[in-house]
Image: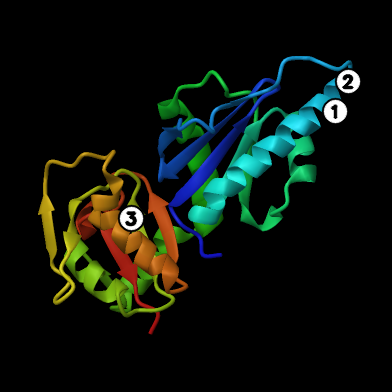
Amino acid sequence: MQPSIHYYVLSLSEDKSGLYEGFRDKLIDIQDGIFPLEISPVGNPVSKDTRLRDFFHRTDLSFAHYYEQDPLRLVLVGEKSSLAIFTALKTRQDVLIGKVEGDYSATSTHDLGKIVWPVVKEAIAGVNKNAMRDLAIAAGRHKVVFGIEEVGKCAESEAGATLYVEEDYHVKGSLLKTDHKRVFSKLVNIWQVLDDVVDVIIEKVLKTDGNVIFVNSGSLIKLDRIALILSG
C-alpha cells in the first residue's frame, strides 16, 4: 500500500475506542453511530482480559467497515497493554503505520493530531538527517525545481523524485490539468485539506514511488517553501 498523508487513527482505552481520519496533522473525529465504541456493561463474570479482547475484536470489525470503503493506513494509540491485545487480534497487520503509547482518550482532536503526525511523517520519509545537505548538493547539480507551479508540473511526470515541503505550507486551490498552473486563494482553510494544492502534489509524488520530506517552517524560504529533486 502506498504511503499517504491521509490516514486513520484508532484510539484505544479500556472503556472506549475512537476513530479519526487524518490529513497531515489535522484529525476529524468520526462520530456516526458506529464510533466511538464503548465497552459493554459487565454481565457474565468474565475476566478483564476476556472483556477487553471481546471489545477490541468488536473494535477491529467496526474499523474494517471503514477500511473496506476507503483503505487507508492506520496509527494505533493506547496503553501498552491495550495495544498488545488489539495487535494480536487484528486481522490486517499490514495496514499499521505505527503506534503511540499512552491513554489519549481524553485528549482533544487538535492535540492528538500533533501527537500522531510525527509517526506518519517518519513512515513516509524515514529519518533523514542529511536532508538539507542532499538538497543543496542537488541544487548545485541543477537537479532541483522549486515553487509550487514548477513543482506541480514536474510531480505529474517525474517518477521517484524527492519532494521537500515546509511543515505548515498550505495553498488553497487546485492544479489545472492542462498546464499544471495553480488556481488558488490565499485565504487557506486548513480544515478543507482536500482543496490544498500542496497536499495534491504530495500525493502525486508518493503515488509515483517518490519520497516526501517535511522540514521546519522557513527552511525553504529561498525556494518558495517547496522544492523537488528530480530523479533523472
Answer whether residue 128 is visible to the viewer in this image.
no
Separation of residues labelled 2 and 3 (CA atoms): 52 Å
Which residue matches tag 3?
165
Amino acid type of disc 2? Answer: Val
Q: Residue 24 placed where, x, y %?
A: 40, 45
**SS for callout 3:** strand
The mark that comes first in sequence, 1 or 3, is 1
Q: Nearer the viewer, mark 2 or mark 3?
A: 2
**Dot 2: few (<14), some (14–19), or many (≥20) neighbours within 10 Å?**
few
**SS for callout 2:** loop
**Dot 3: few (<14), some (14–19), or many (≥20) neighbours within 10 Å?**
many
- Quarter of the image for residue 220 reads bottom left
Which residue matches tag 2?
46
The residue under the point 48% across, 41% down is 117
Q: Residue 172 placed where, x, y %?
A: 18, 49
Q: Name above or below for residue 139 compared with residue 185.
A: below
The residue under the point 40% across, 59% down is 132
